[in-house]
Image (tube, grey):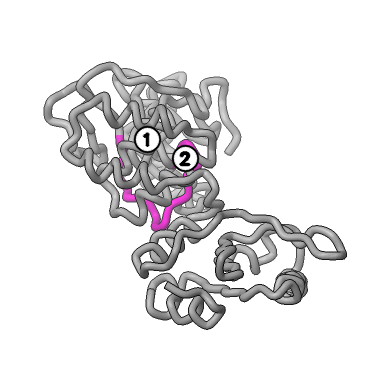
Amino acid sequence: MTATMDGAPAELLLVRELESPEDGRRLRREAEQGHLTRLRRGVYLPTARWAAAGAMERALLALHAFALVAERPPVFSHQSAALLHGLPFLRFPDRDVHILTRCASGGRASDGVRRHAAAAEVAFVEVGGLRVTTLERTLVDLAAVSPFAEAVAFADAALAAGGSLPLAQAEADSSERRAWRKVQRVLDFATPLAESPGESVSRLVLHRLNFPAPILQHSFRDWRGSIGRVDFWWPEQRVVGEFDGRIKYQGRYGERPEDTVWREKRREDRLRALGLGVARWTWQELEAPQKLAAVVLRAGLAR
């Protein structure tokens, strides 16, 4: 998205910035004709641009549109903050805009806006010209309200993006949260070493299946040199585990999918030549934990 000096996407059209009332009426006519899409009262976007945007980009555009017409600069929180920080989602975020408020009636959704009560002034950072809760505050807020697997994935990603676990712990301890125990469980389980939501959920499912905790991102070498890092390593049982996300095989890393498959096969052959058991799984196994158990047991991992 191209942006203006204040960080708002340049494609957003704000009625109050038009030179004359006739320009505003023209915008409304174009919206009625389907040429423009109304994102907020007084904020429009060319419909072709909206149609071409993916779900995440549409959500970002909605945040900028809200900020343009808000009475005061909002501080975005929860899922909106995760979106601005670039944290990955296990599923698409809801359509609500999430902001902090000093009002006691936080949490209620009105006009697509969910207001979360903040007892005191909250530290924020600026991302793309918008105010957003810090990575640590975002981590803790999401840990309190998200399903545990999603909360762990958010926490891992926030730490990998530079968030501080001690600061997140201090954030959790500094306010009275009814979900403090849940937040603490997430913080205790979180790690900056998980490189994708699939790896985060894999750790959690393996833990729930009573398999031993693995070493993450361990590097291997053979006589030819570096083989590379593996997602999971159980040294006592000489088993490695790899989560295979679909993105790896869709040519996203600058190579053809068939070349990726061949490279991964050669890499796995070198690992097996070291006498290691190799387990590979996908989201399909994560969604049916007993299938994942069968995969790692077959590779030689014991509970």
Amino acid at circle 1: Thr
Q: Quadrant of residue 118?
A: top left
Give the amino acid type for the residue marked by disc 2 in the picture: Ala
Q: Position of residue 293 (x, y in %)?
A: 43, 77
Q: Which residue is mark 2?
A: 158
Pointer 1 and pointer 2: residues touching (CB < 8 Å)? yes
- Residue 205, image quadrant: bottom left
Q: Position of residue 102 (x, y in %)?
A: 20, 21
**Of residues 13 and 148, the one drawn nearer to the viewer in this rendering:** 148
Magenta stretch: residue 91 in it? yes
Left or right side of 200 for 180: left
Nearer to me, 100 or 26? 100
Compared across the picture, whether 249 is left or right of 24 comes to right
Of mark 1 and mark 2, the one earlier in the sequence is 1
| Front in this rendered view, residue 249 or 175 | 175
Residue 90 at x, y percent in the picture: 41, 57
Image quadrant containing the C terminus:
bottom left
Look at mark 1 in the image and give the residue it sits on. Answer: 138
Does the stretch in magenta take in 152? no
User: Magenta part of the protein: which range?
Assistant: 83-98
Question: What kind of element bears circle 1?
Answer: helix
Residue 271 vs residue 65: left or right? right
